[in-house]
Amino acid sequence: MQFIWKKGVKPLFSESEYDDKQFKDVQFAYETLDSVKFYDCTFTNCEFSETLFRDCKFSGCQFINCNLNLIKVVDSQFSQVRFSECKLVGINWTEAIWPKISIPGALAFEECTLNHSTFIGLELQQCVIRKCMAKNVDFREANFTKADLSSTDFSESVFGETNLTSADFSYSRNYQIDPSGNRITKATFMLPEAVSLLYCMDIQLKDE
């Protein structure tokens, strides 16, 4: 079943649970959504900027070309959720509820804007942040083991005590990662960008 709202028409999520539904052109900016569960739902071209998602659950859902800038995810849950070509600026993902036992691949971002967001201390093994703009994002103390972090711009982002074991930074750029302050065993980097890993060391680099 597909739910389609025309622009300018305010949608109402009157049910407490939605399963395998498609939402298109939903206009729900600056609203509050309380205690609603979404399973295997798809959101396309939806406007959720500055919306408060409180005690909501998203499992197996997809967001495509949606605006989620500055949303709040207080006490909400995310499992196997994929974002494609979405705006996700200024989100504090630590406000959500995360399971004590990490579920691999809980979040996937592809061709998204994640600037000024926070992932401090989260368990996000096998997370995907591919072909994204991740400027000034806080990744400190997070676990990104086996994460796909390829083809992403990490300008001004912070890594500290971050577990990047076996993470893939292929074709990524502008990252500043101190090898002595982060776990990068078996992580994949590419030249010339990988030279930045040496800048934190007490050594001199000379051109030929």
Image (tube, rainbow, N blue to C red):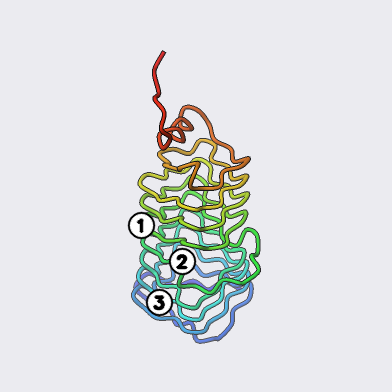
Instruction: Give the farthest residue toward the top.
Output: 208
Q: Position of residue 116 (x, y in %)?
A: 36, 57
Residue type marked 2: Trp
Q: Residue placed at 48% from the left, 39% from the top?
A: 172
Mark 3 near mark 2, Cβ–Cβ under 8 Å?
A: no
Q: Residue placed at 56% from the left, 43% from the top?
A: 184
Answer with mark 1 or mark 2, whichever residue precedes in sequence. Answer: 2
Q: Position of residue 206 (x, y in %)?
A: 39, 19
Secondary structure of residue under mark 1: loop
Q: Residue placed at 35% from the left, 47% from the top?
A: 156
Mark 3 near mark 1, Cβ–Cβ under 8 Å?
A: no
Residue type marked 1: His
Give the spatial CA distance, label 1 vs label 2: 11 Å
Marking on residue 52: 3
Residue type marked 3: Leu
**Mark 3 against mark 1, which lies toward the viewer?**
1
Answer with mark 3 or mark 2, whichever residue precedes in sequence. Answer: 3
Marking on residue 116: 1
Answer with mark 3 or mark 1, whichever residue precedes in sequence. Answer: 3
Instruction: Name the one closer to the observer, 143 or 180.
Output: 180
Give the spatial CA distance, label 3 vs label 1: 18 Å
Q: Position of residue 71 (x, y in %)?
A: 39, 69
